Image (cartoon, rainbow, N blue to C red):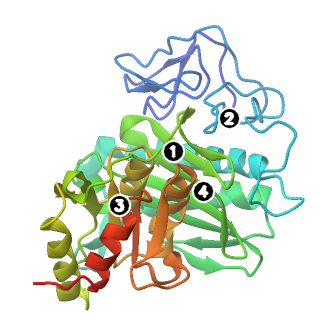
Amino acid sequence: MTHPKPGQPRAGTGNGYDTPPGQAVAGGGRGFDSISGQAVAGSGFDPTPGQAVAGSGSGFDPMSGQALSGNGRGFDPIPGQAVAGSCSGFDTRAAMDVAAEAVEAACAILLAGQADLAGLRHTVKAPGDIATDIDRRAEEAIRRRIRRAYPGHAFLGEETGASGTAPFRWIVDPLDGTVNYVRGFPYYAVSVALEHEGRPLLGLVADPARAECFAAIAGGGAFCNGRPLAVAGRTRLDEAVVGTVVPPPRFPGLDDYLARFCAVARQAAGVRRAGAAALDLAAVAAGRLDAFFVVSLARWDVAAGTLLVTEAGGAVADIDGGDDPLGGNRLVAANRHLLPALLPLLSGKAGRP
């Protein structure tokens, strides 16, 4: 994309997603300031004018919230060093930049699509589970950017399934919360993660409606629009608010899930169900929710969000005691004080009425 000079409006989709700072955004949408990480109300004008973003990068660094320059890398919170927990010789920071560009492209598609929800075509995969043209277009935009940078990597997407066999695998949910999206309920996200031999390297969850970008690199911490994240410090379950995803009507383990739900609801301060697991996990990482549990989702729903939680100081465990919480997708995420209280309730070992 060729960007106009700072201070000029940018025509196009009119979605108001402003990557280069110092530019007005046509269409009257909500601007996004890549320097401050703040949503800009009204005309979409970025309040940090006079700073241009050089290179071909997206202009937004989800780890630092700083402007990018030169080759698109910009300010690196771990300068000149490999990221702890990553595989030797692989530039995880560069991969995060690619992920940020891919996610930005998907967010632009989602925001533009909100202008014509009535004309949006969708198919019902199962009761309570739908897919739209927007899902497919967003995933294709993400896949295209990743393939350009890493043609040898494997890919697992909700819409297109698995392709390729390689130690590195990208895991993508282009629109988590599709049912919310098609109803204009502003709680949906784009989720992208990269694994190496099953171990998470990076995760990125973007909330287009609120212009928030949650990002984590293994060993490098978790951030939202450049601000460090930390899980909440509550130690009592009766003070905790817990998020969850209710399975669809025909889920074979629905009754078992409802028993788990009731066990938690009887002891927690509250339970919330908003319809986008990636954002729920990001909320745990940010300390907005104290915990989250799920029994019915796929790897693409939780791969990025679970890394956010662990890098924000939390913990993730398999409800049934397995070694890989993502393997069975029956997991609970919380701080290290609440997790021991939740696991017996969810596993049934504490007994259920």
Q: Which residue is mark 3?
A: 338
* Quadrant (top left, top right, bottom left, bottom right) of the N terminus: top right
- Looking at the image, can residue 250 be seen? no
How far is disc 3 from disc 2 in space, using C-alphas?
46 Å
Tell us which disc is closer to us: 2 or 1: 1
- Numbered disc total: 4
Q: Which residue is mark 1?
A: 214
* Label located before the other in sequence (2 or 1): 2
Give, as a three-letter code, the residue at label 3: Leu
Residue 40 against residue 47 in the figure, above or below = below
Q: Is residue 246 left or right of residue 153?
A: left
The percent coordinates of residue 353 (x first, y second) are 9, 84
The reply to whether callout 4 and callout 2 are in contact (CB within 8 Å) is no
Tell us which disc is closer to us: 3 or 2: 3
The percent coordinates of residue 115 (x first, y second) are 31, 41
Give, as a three-letter code, the residue at label 4: Ile
